[in-house]
Image (tube, rainbow, N blue to C red):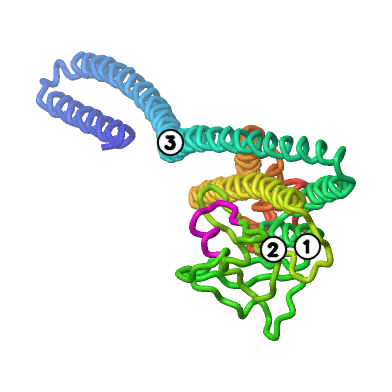
Amino acid sequence: MELSELAAKETSAIVERLERDIAELTTRLSAAAATEREAAVDRVIAEARTAADRLRTEIAEQVADNAAATAALAETRSQSDLLRTSLESVEALLATARTDLLDARRLNEQAEAARAEALAARDRETSARATAETELQDLRDLIQEHERARADVEARLDAAVQRDGAAASLLDGLLSGFGTLATATTIPDILTTLVEQLAAEFPRVALFRPKANRLEGQHQIGFDLSNDITKVAMPLGLDSLLTRAASSGHIESVTGGELAEGSHVPFGGSPMCAVALPVVVQGETLGVVYADDWGSDRQDSLPERAARIKYCEAMLQHAVALLMRLTNELKTMAELRAYAASLLNEIEQMYAADVGAEKTSEELRRRLQANVEYARSIFATRVALECPAATTLIEDEFASSIEKEDGGPFGRDLEAVAGSHAQDRMRA
């Protein structure tokens, strides 16, 4: 019940009581004796006045109490509305706090996953670095061995120069051949260049590549063949100079009398000197080069033929050293390219997680920028240790992803934050 209703009810009760008192007094006046009527009337009137004053006082007090109660009720309602508003604000803050807590947990899980991946990547990097250092040291040792062999050949050729002017030409050809081989940038280029450089000393030279159980022709100079060299195949089970070199992994050569006795020299003719050079890199035979002097009008002595074979040996060792360095670089480049692709994949996954968390466009780009810079930093650290020439691989991955996305959200934001490096690579 409202306080105003309660006050009205109490006022009605007071009025009813006053009416009852007046009625009672009237009855008493009627019953009073005539002789006492005036005194009684005066007394009753005085009592009535006193009662009326008392009732007026009570009514005024009640009205004041009612006003105070009404004011208190209004204050209570105002405080209730204020508390209700505060409660709604607190509930909104709690909802925001819950959302922020969920986001923080999700980001913490992503950070933990990224940290685990970073640790795994570090372990892989450490293992790859140790392997690369071991292979690099092996390559250095082999190069040193080849350098010593080359120095030995050059020393012998230098000594031969003093005895014969033809040796000087051989040395010049060797040095020129080294320079030309150094310009080759792929495995097929090195093998083809080796054939071309040997053709400076031998009229007939051919390159064979191992395929299954046979050797197949790849490139030739000086052979008068009715068919293309690429259609020539020689079974490894056939006894010949080429197959012996392929099986042993060592240079096989025959000169003079050995040829007359029958040494299974292929392609016919009557050469005075023939040599087969297996190109072996890290235990794998990449090819076998055959060379002979059939068709030459030179009448070389045995020492001169031996010097030409040494020329072939030195050229082969130099080519193998270049191939080893190239294959190691290619292997390292492939590993670093895969590493760059894995970094980009992690960046894309983090971006997708941020999109799922309904991050704003500004937040998406800001976080993407931080992830791109971090990926560039750790990639540069690894590349500096393993292969400085691979510095641009991560920019190539960014450029490739931008092109592949073709205007998609991730591609647009990556293009915006990757900077001019990836754009330059993409244009290139």
| In this view, 261 is above or below 41 | below
8 or 409, which lies in front? 409
| In this view, 144 is above or below 28 | below
The three-letter amino acid code for the residue at tag 2 is Ala
161 or 362, which lies in front? 161
Q: Residues within 10 Å of mark 2 (few under 14, many from 20)?
A: many
Q: Say which of marks 1 and 3 sits in front.
A: 1
Q: Is residue 96 left or right of residue 161?
A: left
Look at the numbered disc 2 and give the secondary structure of its residue.
strand
In reply to whether residue 141 is colored magenta, the answer given is no
Label disc, if present, on residue 410 of the rendered structure? none
Label 1, on which residue?
199
Horizontal and vertical percent position of residue 188 = 68, 61
The three-letter amino acid code for the residue at tag 3 is Ala
31 or 55, which lies in front? 55
N-term mark: 1 or 3: 3
N-term mark: 2 or 1: 1
Q: Residue furthest right?
A: 165
The three-letter amino acid code for the residue at tag 1 is Ala
Instruction: Work out how far the residue at label 2 is from the one at label 3, CA to CA, in angstroms.
Output: 57 Å
Image quarter in which the C terminus is found: bottom right
Label 3, on which residue?
116
Badge 1 vs badge 3, beta-carbon distance below 8 Å: no
Look at the numbered disc 3 and give the secondary structure of its residue.
helix
Badge 2 vs badge 1, beta-carbon distance below 8 Å: yes
Horizontal and vertical percent position of residue 139 = 60, 38
Q: Is residue 105 left or right of residue 404?
A: left
**Magenta range:** 242-252
Label 2, on which residue?
291
In reply to whether residue 250 is colored magenta, the answer given is yes
